[in-house]
Image: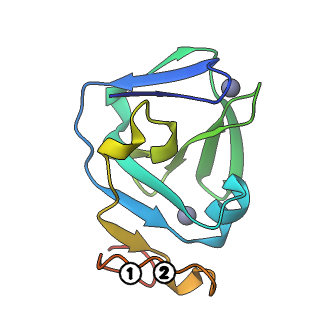
């Protein structure tokens, strides 16, 4: 699978399968992506190849790095010292985002009250554990 930012300067690709795919309702992702909810999925850190312009890195909190395109500002990925296995890539950066539906919600306790998603997926108040 592969993905890219809005201006096409930053690309990534991987031969791995997504470890999981979910919605995140946390306030950090919401503000960082300027979107009411985001979706991301896990791929092993070493299985992701970055192509084109290297993503810029924003340290949004202790041990957390958010990767984005320095040209157009598209948020690309999230990585945390707490997850040594996977980098979390934003589903919307995929070439074909429709092929990787979320399987559950995390940080649902922080979801916006006016956001009504009518799926029957599991909703975790914080992380999925
Ligand atoms: Zn870009
Ligand atoms: Zn989040």
Evaluate if marks 2 and 1 touch, with contact meaning CB atoms under 8 Å apart: yes
Q: Which mark is residue 108?
A: 2
Asked which colour scheme the image uses, the reply is rainbow
Q: Position of residue 87 (x, y in %)?
A: 42, 43
Q: Position of residue 45 (x, y in %)?
A: 38, 36
Q: Which mark is residue 124?
A: 1
In the drawing, does residue 103 fall left or right of residue 107?
left
Residue at 46% x, 76% y: name it: 117
Residue at 60% x, 53% y: name it: 64
Q: Residues within 10 Å of mark 2 (few under 14, many from 20)?
A: some
**Vertical order, 99 against 46 (above or below):** below
The numbered mark, 2 or 1, whose residue comes first in the sequence reads 2
For label 1, the SS is loop
Q: Position of residue 35 (x, y in %)?
A: 66, 60
In the drawing, does residue 35 fall left or right of residue 46?
right
Residue at 67% x, 53% y: name it: 33
């Amino acid at each position: 699978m592969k993905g890219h930012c809005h201006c096409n300067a930053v690309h990534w690709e991987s031969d791995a399968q997504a470890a999981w795919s979910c919605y995140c309702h946390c306030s950090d992702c919401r503000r960082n992506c300027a979107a009411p909810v985001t979706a991301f999925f896990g791929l092993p850190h070493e299985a992701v190849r970055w192509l084109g312009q290297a993503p810029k890195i924003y340290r949004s909190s202790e041990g957390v790095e958010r990767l984005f395109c320095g040209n157009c500002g598209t948020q690309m990925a999230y990585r945390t010292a707490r997850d040594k296995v996977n980098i979390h890539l934003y589903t919307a950066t995929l070439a074909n985002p429709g092929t990787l539906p979320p399987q559950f919600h995390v940080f649902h306790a922080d979801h916006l009250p006016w956001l009504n998603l009518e799926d029957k997926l599991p909703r975790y108040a914080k992380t999925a554990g």
